[in-house]
Amino acid sequence: MPSATEECRKPSGNCRGISHCLESGHPISCINSCCLIVLLQRIAGITMTLQYGLEASFREGLSSGNADVLRECLRTYSTIDKTRDAEALFRSCVVKPYMDEVFACYALFI
C-alpha cells in the first residue's frame, strides 16, 4: 500500500491523498506535506499559464511596435523579477533574426 505522501503525489490523488492522511491518522506534518505538494503543483501551472500569456503579449508588442504593450510587459517582467526572460525573448525575436540577415548578406559578398 502506498504511503500517504506517495498518494498525494499522484495527479489524480491530490485531494484523496489529504483525505487519506486524515482518515488514516497520519501526523499533521504528512497532511502539511500533501497540502504543500498540491499548492506547488497549482502554482507551477498558474505560473506557466501567465508566462505564456506574457510572452505572447511581448511578442505581439514587438511585432506591432506598440510601445504601450511593451511598457506594460516590461513592467510586469520587472515586477515578477523575470527581466532576464524578457531579454532572452528580445534576443530571440529581434536580435537573432537581424544578425542572421546581416551575416547572410555579408556571406554574399565574400
Image (cartoon, helix red, strand yellow):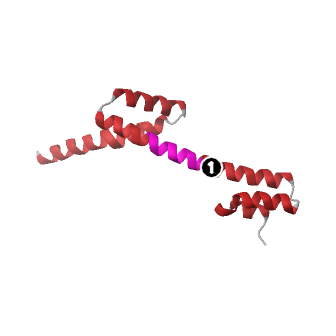
Residue 96 lies in magenta, yes or no?
no
- Image point (16%, 43%), residue name: 106
- The residue range painted magenta reads 44-54
Chief SS of the magenta region: helix
Return the residue found at the far left.
109
- Image point (65%, 49%), residue name: 40
- Numbered disc 1: secondary structure: helix
Residue 36 location in percent, x, y?
72, 49
The correct choice, above or below, for 18 with respect to 89 in the image is below
The correct choice, above or below, for 10 with respect to 98 in the image is below
Q: Is residue 73 left or right of residue 11?
A: left
Q: How many marks?
A: 1
Q: Is residue 95 left or right of residue 37?
A: left
- Image point (78%, 50%), residue name: 32
Query: Circle 1 is placed at which residue position?
Result: 42
Q: Is residue 77 left or right of residue 31?
A: left
Q: Is residue 39 left or right of residue 72?
A: right
Residue 27 location in percent, x, y?
87, 55
